[in-house]
Every structure is written in structure tokens, then in C-alpha cells.
Amino acid sequence: MDNALRKFIEDMPKVELHLHIEGSLEPELAFKLAQKNGVTLYKDKEKTIPFESAEELKAAYKFDNLQEFLDLYYRGMSSLKTEQDFYDMTMAYLTKAKSQNVTHTEIFFDPQQHMENGIAFETALNGIHRALKDGEEMGVTSKLIMSFLRHLPETAPEGVERAYKDAFETLELAKQHLDKIDGFGLDSSEAPFPPAIFERVYEEARKTGKPVMAHAGEEGPWEYVRDALDILKVDRIDHGNHCLDNEALVQRLVDEKMGLTVCPYSNLRLNHTTDFATDTKLTDMKQHPIKKMLDLGLKASIHSDDPAYFRTDEGKGGYMTENYLAVAEALNLSRDDIVTLARNAIETSFMSPEQKTAKTQELDAYTQRADVFQKYVNQVGGEQARTA
Ligand SMILES: [Zn+2]
């Protein structure tokens, strides 16, 4: 890739809208927390073979599909016990984000999984929230989105013994902390759990006045994207890739200026199925649909999803800059495409109109400065060329 474009991407102010904070837990930190808390991280679901080192854990980050990833992701989360653990994990992410010029981030957390691990809702919430407040002092503004786990029911069957809280119970807990929670999402295994089974809890969640969103069209079909709009009445779609399978839906998303938070390394590492009919998998970033999405006028943007798990070929965490660089390189994106992606993220964020205007101005000013600098380089280059 052109060095100027690389530098432009690295230094560009960015907005992240699709990040699971538990997915930012780097193997080194997961291992450190597990040791501190006396938790064993296991290689297998049956909990027979423990990981011996962070390196071994990192080496296990190879997945064939979403479920394989989720199995390890939930095991990694078990290392988190105290409020300070949640703070440390969130602060590590914010520090990384800041180093990549992320100026605003909207992050998910999965309280149902923590509660299943015996951690109080407030322990997770307060640790993350305290870090987000400190992050604002560092210049990274944020929103915190509580996600429902779609493999757990909206309402648990009566009389059945269980370790988990259902979606309605979790929403009730969230309602006591609406000063710290800025919206509601839906994540975890998508395919067997269509949006319709969460209709009632979404209706209730929307009554809080907070925005709602849902993962849709990642491993599920385009109909899940439509149902997330019609049944859950979402304000934003997470992933949404399979909307491309239905022209009328694409047009509707364009007309409604609906945000789609796309995650390239996540799609690549989970062998995203691009065509259900032929079972074609995304195995090379060159096949990623983000350029097509932009050309169709969709408000798609780039995010990292679970950056500690979806790593680059060199083994680096796949954070915002890595995701931008990967698609820019593979799809030969222009600088205008990059700016459009960044602009789409600002426009489809849940920031206030004033904040959005300020972020847009910041991006415009950055682009203009880069133009002036490039002109200067060209001139100097030209001078040197003449005197040589
Ligand atoms: Zn996600």
C-alpha cells in the first residue's frame, strides 16, 4: 500500500461502534487475571486440559465458525472476577484505542455471561463504567451498550433450575442503572435464534428511550436483518453483511440511512459464509464486501468486534487501524473511501448532533491538513527532482 495512505489511516481520527469489551481481553491479561483469581483457563469445553501459558492461549485463537470462537470467548471471560478486573480490561482497550486515534467508542458488554460466572451485574458495570469515565479524561468519549445473549431465552421456563438470568431479568437490572447504560444490543450465536424471539424484551427496552441495535446478517440470512428492523425496531444493525442478498432490503437500508457496523477481521477469522447456496466462505480479505456496500450507498463502517481474538496474519490484535489497513490494502480502497467509512461511523453513532458536528469538523480538518502536507511533499519532491 501507498505509504501516504497508510499514514493517513493511522493518524485519522476514528469512531468505533462495534466492540465487545470482553473481546478486547488480550491473552496476556486474561492469563494474568486468571492466575491472580485462581481461575484455570481450559483448552476444552469439558475442562480437562488447562492452558499453560498466554502463548498457548493465543495459539488457540483459530476458529472455523462463530460458535467455536464463542466457546473460547466465554471461557476467557471466566478470568474476570473483581470490579478492578473489569476496569483493567476496559482501560487496556481504551489505551490501545487512544494510540490508534480512536476518539469515540461505543462498546458492548455481556452481563448475562458474567452473572452466570457468579459476578454481580454491578461489579461488571461499575468497573467498565469507571474506566470509560477515565477514558474521557484521556480524550476518548464513549457509550456503553448492554447486550442480551441470544442463546439465552427472553423469559426462562418456570420451575427449571438455572445459573443464568434471562433477558427480561437482565433488563430489569439494567433499568436501575440507566445513568451508565446508553443502549441495548443482541449478540452471541445468531443462526438458530431469529430476532422475533426477542420481540417483547426489545419493546420493553425501547421504553427506556435508549437506542437499540442487534447483530443480524452475520451468520443469519438477510431476513434476520429485515426482522431486526421490523420486529425489534433497531436504530442500527451490527454486521448486516447478508443484506446484500436482497436488493429491496439494500434499497431500504440506503433510504433509511441505517448504520451497518461491519467487522472485516472478524468476518475473515470466522470464515463468514458469503453465499449460503454454494456455501462459499470468505477466506481472503479481497472477497470482503465492504467496498460493494459503500458503492451501493449503504452507511457501512469499519470496526473491530473482538480485536484480541481476530488477529492479523502477523499475530497482532485486530484493532481499528489493523481493520482499516487490511481492507484498504486488499480492496485497493481510495482515500475517499476511507474518509467515507470514517464519516459513516460518525453519522450512525449515538453521539449528540453537536458531538457529531464536532467530529465531522475534526475529520474534515484532518483531511485538509493531509492535503496541504501532500502538496508540500509533492512540491519539495518536484524541486529536488529538478536540482538532481
Ligand atoms: Zn459483534
Image (cartoon, grey):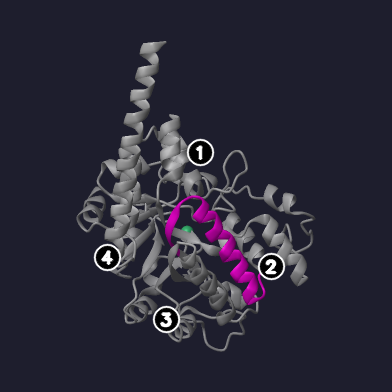
Residue 33 on the magenta span: no
> Which disc is residue 79 wearing?
2
Instruction: Pinpoint residue 31: horizontal percent, then vertical percent.
Output: 72, 60
Q: Mark 1 highlights which residue?
A: 283
Q: Mark 3 highlights which residue?
A: 179
- Crowd tier of the residue under label 2, counting other residues whose Cα lies within 10 Å: few below 14, some 14–19, many 20 or above: many
Q: Quadrant of the C terminus?
A: top left
Q: Is residue 72 above or below residue 3?
A: below
Q: Amino acid at mark 4?
A: Glu
Q: Residue furthest left?
A: 255
Camera-nearest residue between 18 and 93: 93
Q: Quadrant of residue 226?
A: bottom left
Q: CA distance from mark 3 to mark 4?
A: 20 Å
117 sits left or right of 212 in the view: right
Camera-nearest residue between 272 and 93: 93
Q: CA distance from mark 4 to mark 1?
A: 41 Å
> Which disc is residue 354 wearing?
4
The residue shown at (52%, 52%) is 99
CB-based contact (under 8 Å), mark 3 and mark 4: no
Asked whether residue 321 appears in the rendered view, the answer is: yes
Q: CA distance from mark 3 to mark 2?
A: 27 Å
Q: Nearer the viewer, mark 3 or mark 2?
A: 3
Instruction: Pinpoint residue 351: horizontal percent, then vertical percent.
Output: 33, 65
SS under mark 1? loop
Q: Amino acid at mark 1?
A: Thr
Q: Which residues are magenta?
A: 79-106
SS under mark 4? helix
